[in-house]
Amino acid sequence: MRLLLDTHALLWWLIKSPSLPLSAQNLLKNRDHTVLVSAASAWEIATKVRLGKLDVATDVVENFLAYLARERFEAVPVSAEHGIRAGLLPGPHKDPFDRMLIAQALAENVPIVSSDRALDGYGVKRLW
């Protein structure tokens, strides 16, 4: 199975946060799964580090690709198709990072590992 990680799930996995439930940990530990990480997550984390809202992730930003390689996670670039899908998504969800993750999950036909119930109204399968 292929899975797309929401940014908070990625961070919680990398920093070994107890906030990541065992069910999500088991999904990520399973080497039969291909874990995808959006370029939008790199952008979101770096933005929050720059703004001083996520000091715990400074090392993650500085070594992002090394972290992904260590975990055997695959980076997913943001394509023009993803951008158009994200921009055209209906509904009240205003977070551009979440909208991009929704668009990528839909375009790539993959579930998203996330605690965010706001994603449920967009036709994305959410695992948690």
Image (cartoon, rainbow, N blue to C red):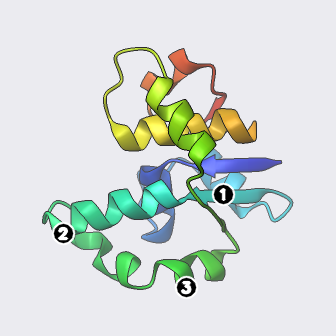
The reply to whether callout 2 and callout 1 are in contact (CB within 8 Å) is no
Residue drawn at the location 53% of the way across and 47% of the way down = 21
Q: CA distance from mark 3 to mark 1?
A: 14 Å
Q: Quadrant of residue 118?
A: top left
First in sequence: mark 3 vs mark 1: 1
Secondary element under disc 1, as helix, strand or loop, is strand
Residue drawn at the location 37% of the way across and 76% of the way down = 61
Q: Which residue is mark 2?
A: 50
First in sequence: mark 2 vs mark 3: 2
Give how far across and how far down residue 116 sits, in percent: 44, 32
In the image, what residue type sits under mark 1? Leu
Give how far across and how far down residue 67 sits, in percent: 54, 79
Callout 3: few (<14), some (14-19), or many (20+) C-alpha neighbours within 10 Å? few
Q: Which residue is mark 1?
A: 36
In the image, what residue type sits under mark 3? Ala
The reply to whether callout 3 and callout 1 are in contact (CB within 8 Å) is no
- Does residue 59 appear left or right of residue 114 in this picture? left
Kindly tell me whether residue 113 is visible in this rendering. no
Secondary element under disc 2, as helix, strand or loop, is helix
Q: Nearer the viewer, residue 34 or 115?
A: 34
Q: Nearer the viewer, residue 48 or 28?
A: 48
Question: What mark, if any, has residue 66 been given in the picture?
Answer: 3
Q: CA distance from mark 2 to mark 3?
A: 20 Å
Give how far across and how far down residue 13 sits, in percent: 51, 63
